[in-house]
Amino acid sequence: MKVLLYCQHVLGVGHLYRSLEIARALQPHEVIFIEGGRPIDEVDYPGNVRILRLPALMMDENFERLFSPDGEDLEAVKNRRKEVLLETCRHERPDVCVIELFPFGRKKFRFELVPLLEMLRRDFPDTLVVSSIRDILVEKKKRDEFEKKALKYLKSFFDLVLVHSDPRVITLQESFARFDEIPVPVEYTGYVVRKPGRCGIRAPSERSGKRIVVSNGGGSVGHELIETAIDAFGLLPLNDVELDVFPGPFMPEEVKKPIESRAARYRGIRVNTFSRDFVSELLASDLSISMAGYNTMMDLLSAGVFGLVYPFKQNREQALRARRFEKFGVVRCIEKLDAEYLAGEILRCLDREPHTGREYPIDTDGALSTKRILERYSRQKKGLYRK
């Protein structure tokens, strides 16, 4: 089975890492991984994957403006991307095409996705076309119009929707009101999590003190959380605590340098580079402080470490996820960015008994489940066209 997997990250890195975990689980099947965002050096690609990097496009933190991070002319970049995408599909003739988020998002990428979908329907009718989405959709200003268009695209071009969530935690109905009108099958896969890798840091049981990890996902937003965590660390009445800061790969240097200067005031703080194996960093810690993006929350589940989370305020997606996982005891929500308040929350969390993710009744087998579902639906569609 040959799978064409389209992934476009525009602000953070969660979409990229979730899609890569799915690609890894698809072994031994061949995956052509189409990556359309700013390249990240600190990424380990699975051996079964061939990478096709489209000319990079990103969006601002308000999700309003599309731009080339390389400073190229936007229309020229869009035309080159469309040509490369169509030629790749024409040459590869995939059995399965998985498109991350569209038509439930990525509307600014219709310039290349609609021609791709039209080609698949016209020239490769036995290709299984799949929409792959996370647990929660970002709310839209014109919700009814957005959902009507999404349903139209689903009916015209798609065979299947995969929701990378556990319906016992969050259902698609909670962020897509016209769920019952979706004209193709919807399958919940469970959450897609990364496994610990090769990090050599000592486990909590092998250290005499406590270790806190603070991060801000992709790094484009959330630096205020890191600054507050550093100041809160300075207020802790403890001598056996260390703080490791992991800025995201997209954090601008003009933001990172003041953070490094702030951290230098306190003994026991390290500002690290972005980690290839963040799950193992969490596994070797006693507490995480972060935002509440999909990928970060799944890393917390995988590592079994408790988290203090401050949801991204631009939309309700992270807040809804954080509150839902708070009910399961995975995290506690930070109500405000205040150093004294956060220091108190940290002290309360460090007094908790260690725990593991196994105690939660949450399905985290989403990557392998995705593989099984794609295999089944692809066989079914091929069978229809051979009759």
Image (cartoon, rainbow, N blue to C red):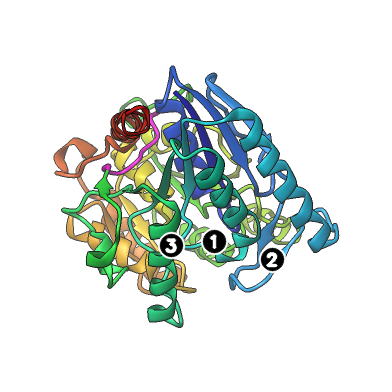
Please provide percent x and percent y for residue 56. Answer: 72, 50
Q: Nearer the viewer, residue 141 or 152?
A: 152
Q: Who's the residue at 51% across and 65% down the image?
A: 228
Q: Nearer the viewer, mark 2 or mark 3?
A: 3
Element assignment for label 1: loop
Q: Is residue 266 visible?
A: no
Q: In the image, 351: left or right of 200? A: left
Task: Name the amino acid, label 1.
Answer: Arg
**Mark 1 — residue?**
106
> From what the image shows, is residue 83 above or below residue 368?
below
Q: Is residue 249 left or right of residue 129?
A: right
Q: Is residue 303 magenta?
A: no
194 magenta-colored:
yes
> 285 or 309: which is nearer to us?
309
Magenta segment: 189-196
**Disc number at residue 184?**
none
Quarter location, residue 27? top left
Can residue 127 be seen by looking at this rendering?
A: yes
Q: Position of residue 339 (x, y in %)?
A: 46, 69
**Looking at numbered disc 3 in the image, what kind of residue is underneath it?**
Phe
Q: Which mark is residue 66?
A: 2
Are circles 2 and 3 on residues that touch, CB within 8 Å? no
